Image: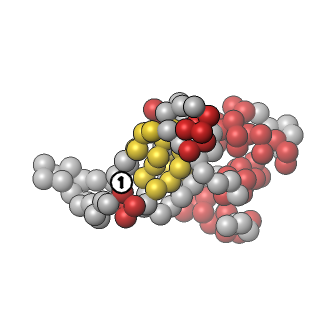
Amino acid sequence: MHQTSSNFRQLCADHGIAMTHQRQVLYEVMHGMEGHPSPEEVYAKVKKRIPAISLATVYKNIHLFVDSGIFRKMSLHHGSVRVEMNDEPHHHMVCSRCKAITDIGEKELGLTPARRRLSDGFLVERYSVDVIGLCAKCQQAQ
């Protein structure tokens, strides 16, 4: 979804961050990407629109978006920081060879909607199930 300047300004205000041109371009690029992009993948696309931007600036702003709640960060055990672009409840299939990450729905895994509070009073923010295996492409390469 493409955000207009006023919509992005409001999103920034709602999450307590300053709006800048670099952040708006970064946000627009990330929303145009599928899957779970790494900062390096985002940087390659943003650099086409802002040639002077640095990888450090991209990392810094991705972390700012994550810390402010605009985006979610996936767990770090997938090899590098990956940003979660899908807002719908889902889990992940991770290829143990090429590290490709694919979304998988709860129904496909046979999971039932989870409780928000566990028996010891632990308040659940989200559930994340990783299904580890070989993707079809890596299986064919064997």
Q: Nearer the viewer, residue 91 or 27?
A: 91
Is residue 83 among the parts visible in the rendering?
no
In the rendered image, residue 12, in percent from the top left (x then y), is placed at 61, 58
- Pick the quarter of the image with the N terminus: bottom right
Three-letter amino acid code of the residue under disc 1: Arg
Based on the displayed image, in which of its 4 quarters is residue 90 positioned? Answer: bottom left
Can you say whether 93 is above or below 52 in the image? below
Can you say whether 39 is above or below 89 in the image? above
| In the image: residue 142, left or right of residue 22 | left
Determine crowd level at label 1: few under 14, some 14-19, many 20+ residues with C-alpha closer than 10 A: few
Q: Residue at x 57, y 54 (%)?
A: 85
In the rendered image, residue 97, in percent from the top left (x then y), is placed at 54, 31
Label 1, on which residue? 126
Q: Residue at x 18, y 53 (%)?
A: 118
What secondary structure is found at the residue carrying circle 1? loop
In the rendered image, residue 87, in percent from the top left (x then y), is placed at 50, 61
